[in-house]
Amino acid sequence: MSQAWIKALAFAALPGASKVRFERRFSNENGTPTTNYKLTSLTANGTPMGDDRDYDLLKAALGPLESLAEHEDHKDLIIELDLENSMLRHL
């Protein structure tokens, strides 16, 4: 499982990023359950990088991550990849 996450996160990272983080959050707003996803590329000092990719490119990056997240427990999820040493962490 780890290799699939590493591959998908590396693909989704912005050029020049040091780390990339994927988050899945569940909420229940107004009685309607929702799932929110967030993808953040970070610089070496931890500053989030602006992501102005076209919607279709962003969706192509998020799709594999969303699919992998479906196989995880149905709870909030934060996974971060250190791109410099391919270290994967569940936060």
Image (cartoon, rainbow, N blue to C red):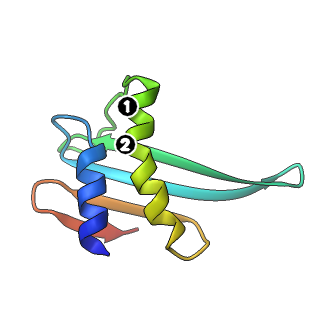
Please report the residue visible at 10 percent of the width from the left and 55 percent of the height from the top: 84
Please report the residue visible at 45 percent of the width from the left and 48 percent of the height from the top: 63
Give the Cα distance between marks 1 and 2.
Answer: 6 Å
Q: Residue furthest right?
A: 31
In the figure, is residue 87 to the left or right of 4? left
Mark 1 touches mark 2? (CB < 8 Å): yes
Please report the residue visible at 20 percent of the width from the left and 40 percent of the height from the top: 17
Pointer 2 residue: 61
Q: Residue furthest left?
A: 85
Q: Position of residue 10 (x, y in %)?
A: 23, 51
Instruction: In this rendered view, identify the residue nearer to me: 24 or 59.
Output: 59
Q: Position of residue 1 (x, y in %)?
A: 32, 75
In the figure, is residue 33 to the left or right of 60? right
The kind of residue on which mark 2 rests is: Ala
In the figure, is residue 31 to the left or right of 14? right
Q: Position of residue 46 (x, y in %)?
A: 27, 45
45 vs 91: above or below: above
Circle 1: element type: helix
Q: Position of residue 50 (x, y in %)?
A: 35, 28
Please report the residue visible at 31 percent of the width from the left and 33 percent of the height from the top: 49
The kind of residue on which mark 1 rests is: Leu
Pointer 1 residue: 57
Q: Give the quadrant of residue 68.
A: bottom left
Q: Which quadrant, please, contains the C terminus?
A: bottom left
Q: Give the quadrant of residue 13.
A: top left
